[in-house]
Image (cartoon, rainbow, N blue to C red):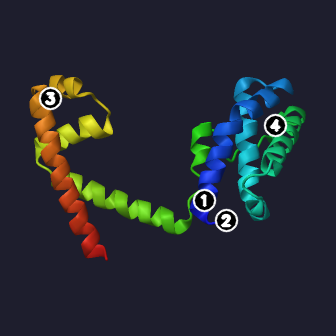
Amino acid sequence: MPSAEFSTWVGELVRRHRAGLLRSAVALGLQPDEALDVVQDAFAIFLSRPEWRALPRHTPDAERLLGALVRNTARTHRRRPHRRHQALEDDPVEEIVEVAPLPDALLAEAEEHHRLTGCVATLKEMQRAVVVARLFEGDSGLEAASRLGMTPRNVAVVLHRARKRLEACLAESRARAA
């Protein structure tokens, strides 16, 4: 299965079965936070085995395998709490959907982040402040306007112009890199 298709398939597995897998782990005597750890560990084990990538997409084999992994991991977790798996401990379940990217994808993401950071730095001060407030900090137009001492309409205009500059800067940066 190609990587993108596999990622989509695993994402569907997570969305369809995480609640049931969590209930299964809780039924085995774990606290909810421990159950979440166990389900995360089970998905990590599932993703670490390349031969399981060949499981047919539309069969219950993967679901049965995940159920067995959760049960076994929960039992191990209960018996040996001091030896819990730490691979995904602090990540929410939703992040498992994003299967560990390949090194090339990580490099491309880092390069894009570097480009974006460089382009944001070229913005005028007010544009940069609006971009940070609206896009990075998630403020509403009213919140950004209040914090920056602007009208909501002015925030919208400045954000529109800043986006245009960022798009042009990113396109130019990508062209130089190619």
Q: Determine crowd level at label 1: few under 14, some 14-19, many 20+ residues with C-alpha closer than 10 A.
A: few
- The spot of residue 117 in percent (x, y) is 28, 54
Q: Amino acid at mark 2?
A: Met
Q: Going 18% across and 25% down the picture, which residue do you hit? A: 147
Q: Determine crowd level at label 2: few under 14, some 14-19, many 20+ residues with C-alpha closer than 10 A.
A: few
- Residue 22 is tagged as none
**Rendered image quadrant of residue 91:** top right
Q: Amino acid at mark 4?
A: His
Q: Nearer the viewer, mark 1 or mark 4?
A: 1
Q: Secondary structure at mark 2?
A: loop
- Label 1 with label 4: CB-CB less than 8 Å: no
Q: Which residue is mark 1?
A: 5
Q: Secondary structure at mark 4?
A: helix
Q: Nearer the viewer, mark 2 or mark 4?
A: 2
Q: Which residue is mark 2?
A: 1
Lower position in the chain sequence, tag 4 or tag 3: 4
C-alpha span from label 4 to label 3? 50 Å
C-alpha span from label 2 to label 3? 50 Å
Q: Going 9% across and 27% down the picture, which residue do you hit? A: 150
**Rendered image quadrant of residue 174:** bottom left
- Label 2 with label 1: CB-CB less than 8 Å: yes
Q: Secondary structure at mark 1?
A: helix
Q: Secondary structure at mark 3?
A: helix
Q: Which residue is mark 3?
A: 148
Q: Closest to the observer: 157 or 76? A: 157
